[in-house]
């Protein structure tokens, strides 16, 4: 499973990139608004740090305006993925972007039919928001499982980007369910290598080694 960071914070992205396992970045208007920097400048800077896919979301709601924004964003860097909402207008815009070879990430997906439609329309990535489904008492991970089955049944090339992952267990479950990508906040990314027994074990090994060396 590819690992994406779900943040627009340059310090977090630099720190994550230093580990060498960050395959891409997802942003959204809420994350971008926290950074207090011009949108395209910020996204351009992220693309300089990360060579993999970097999602940048449109903020208009009509097909025509979304396509205009998509064309503009696609010029920022080669690795930009234009994030479009999974609405009727968003899917119309997706078809046009796909025809122009603009890569897309269809966001705010909450049920399998949305995932089927965006794959048929040529989305590069499709983002089910698992945490937000869990928040309202639904089983977010079941959606990834359904999407995996549907996409495999028809050999769709759209990648499943498990989003709204809130804790390490979500990451494990997304990987088990066959998500192509998991995008996570930096706080969850930091927990990927954490286990208290690793720390205790290393401490003991080093203490024993020190003793044996006199
Ligand atoms: C993904 O692309 C979204 O930016 C993100 O995962 C949303 O997560 P949230 O539901 O925790 O805001």
Image (spheres, rainbow, N blue to C red):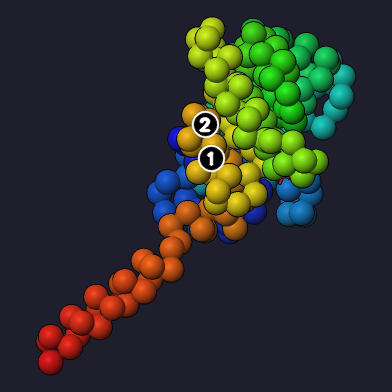
**Which residue does the image show at 47% across and 54% down from the upper left?**
192
Q: Is residue 153 above or below residue 145?
A: above
In the rendered image, the residue lying farthest to the bottom is 214
Q: Residues within 10 Å of mark 1 (few under 14, many from 20)?
A: some
Q: Position of residue 30 (x, y in %)?
A: 78, 46
Badge 2: how crowded within 10 Å, few (<14), some, or many (20+)? Answer: some
Count up the numbered dots.
2
**Residue 92 seen in the figure:** yes
Quadrant of the rendering where the C terminus is positioned: bottom left
**Residue 51, percent from left and from top:** 48, 38
Q: Nearer the viewer, residue 140 or 121?
A: 140
- Front residue of this view, candidates 80 and 134: 134
Residue drawn at (69%, 24%) of the image = 106
| Quadrant in the picture for residue 82 | top right
Residue 133 pos. (x, y %): 74, 37
Which of the 4 image quadrants contains residue 210?
A: bottom left
Mark 2 CB within 8 Å of ligand 1: no
Counting from the top left corner in percent of width and height, residue 160 is at 57, 26
Give the secondary structure at mark 1: helix
Tags 2 and 1 touching, CB below 8 Å: yes
Any mark on residue 177, and which? 2
Q: Nearer the viewer, residue 214 or 16?
A: 214
Q: Is residue 56 above or below residue 61?
A: below
Residue 173's tag is 1
């Amino acid at each position: 499973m590819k690992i994406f960071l779900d943040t627009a914070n340059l310090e977090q992205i630099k720190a994550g990139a230093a580990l060498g396992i960050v395959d891409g970045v997802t942003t959204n208007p809420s994350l971008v608004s926290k950074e207090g920097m011009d949108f395209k400048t910020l996204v351009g800077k992220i693309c300089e740090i990360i060579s993999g896919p970097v999602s940048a979301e449109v903020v208009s709601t009509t097909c025509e305006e979304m396509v205009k924004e998509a064309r503009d964003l696609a010029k920022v860097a080669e690795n930009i993925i234009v994030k479009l909402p999974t609405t009727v207008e968003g899917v119309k815009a997706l078809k046009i972007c796909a025809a122009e070879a603009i890569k897309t990430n269809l966001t705010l997906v909450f049920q399998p039919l949305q995932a089927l439609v965006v794959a048929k329309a040529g989305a590069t990535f499709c983002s089910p928001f698992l945490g937000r489904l869990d928040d309202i008492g639904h089983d977010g991970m079941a959606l990834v499982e359904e999407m995996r089955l549907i996409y495999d049944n028809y050999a769709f090339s759209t990648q499943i980007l498990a989003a709204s992952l809130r804790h390490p267990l979500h990451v494990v479950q997304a990987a088990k369910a066959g998500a192509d990508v998991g995008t996570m906040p930096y706080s969850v990314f930091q927990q990927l290598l954490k286990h208290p027994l690793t720390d205790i074990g290393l401490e003991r090994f080093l203490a024993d080694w020190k003793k044996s060396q006199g």
